[in-house]
Image (tube, rainbow, N blue to C red):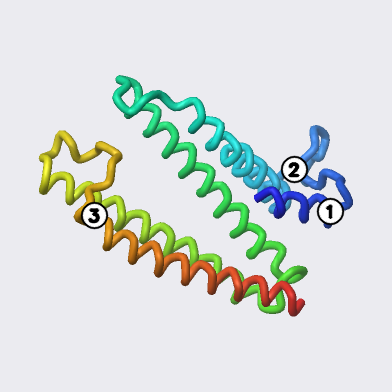
Amino acid sequence: MIGGLLAIFIAHEWTWSGPTPHGGDRNYSAAAYHTMFGIFAVCLAFTQPLGALLRCDMGARMRPIFDLAHRLVGMIAWIFAAITITLACKFFGQRHFSNPDASLALCTIFIVITAAVFIISEFLTVYSKIQNDGIEEAFNLERPRRILPIQTLMFAMYILISFGICLAIGIMMAIK
């Protein structure tokens, strides 16, 4: 993330190209939305390790609330990052990709696969907890050991697919 930010600032010669206080219609352009979603994603992502340092003990009464807030901030940061990347593929594709339509399709496929893996993994966790512990323990964030091999396999496949998609998008950028 830090390397990406540095690359962006170097490419823009350390100048702000996002919305400005008196930017008028330019503040409603795809570039402005891309910039703001990107800034919010980065800021939220930077809060994650800081929040983890301040978390309460495992047995603390407020720990479930912290865990939920920490997860929500992470999910929102990821959604903002996905929006940022999608805006880049959609609106800046002609300048940066050898095949803009393919880059947008790969980006969309990546987002759909990520959402599917996340939803399936959460469903497996909650379902397993309901089967083992009952409904009152279903939303405890600790993963049951029984589904760990399934989730590990899903994660490994997800990493391979993600790497392939990132490689393909990177090649399309390099060819351009």
Tell which of 169 and 24 is nearer to you. 169
On residue 124, the disc is: 3
Q: Which circle's residue, 3 or 1, is located before the other in the chain? A: 1
User: What is the crowding at mark 3: few (fewer than 14 residues within 10 Å), some, or many (at least 20)?
Assistant: some
Mark 2 secondary-structure assignment: helix
Foreground mark, 2 or 1, reads: 1
Q: Are marks 3 and 1 in contact (CB under 8 Å)?
A: no
Q: Is residue 175 above or below residue 111?
A: below
Foreground mark, 2 or 3, reads: 3
Identify the residue shown where x is 77% and y is 55%: 7
Corner quadrant of residue 39: top right
Tell which of 112 and 13 is nearer to you. 13
The Cα–Cα distance between marks 2 and 3, rounded to whole angstroms, is 43 Å
User: What is the crowding at mark 2: few (fewer than 14 residues within 10 Å), some, or many (at least 20)?
Assistant: some
Identify the residue shown where x is 80% and y is 37%: 20
Percent coordinates x, y for residue 128 in the rendering: 17, 50
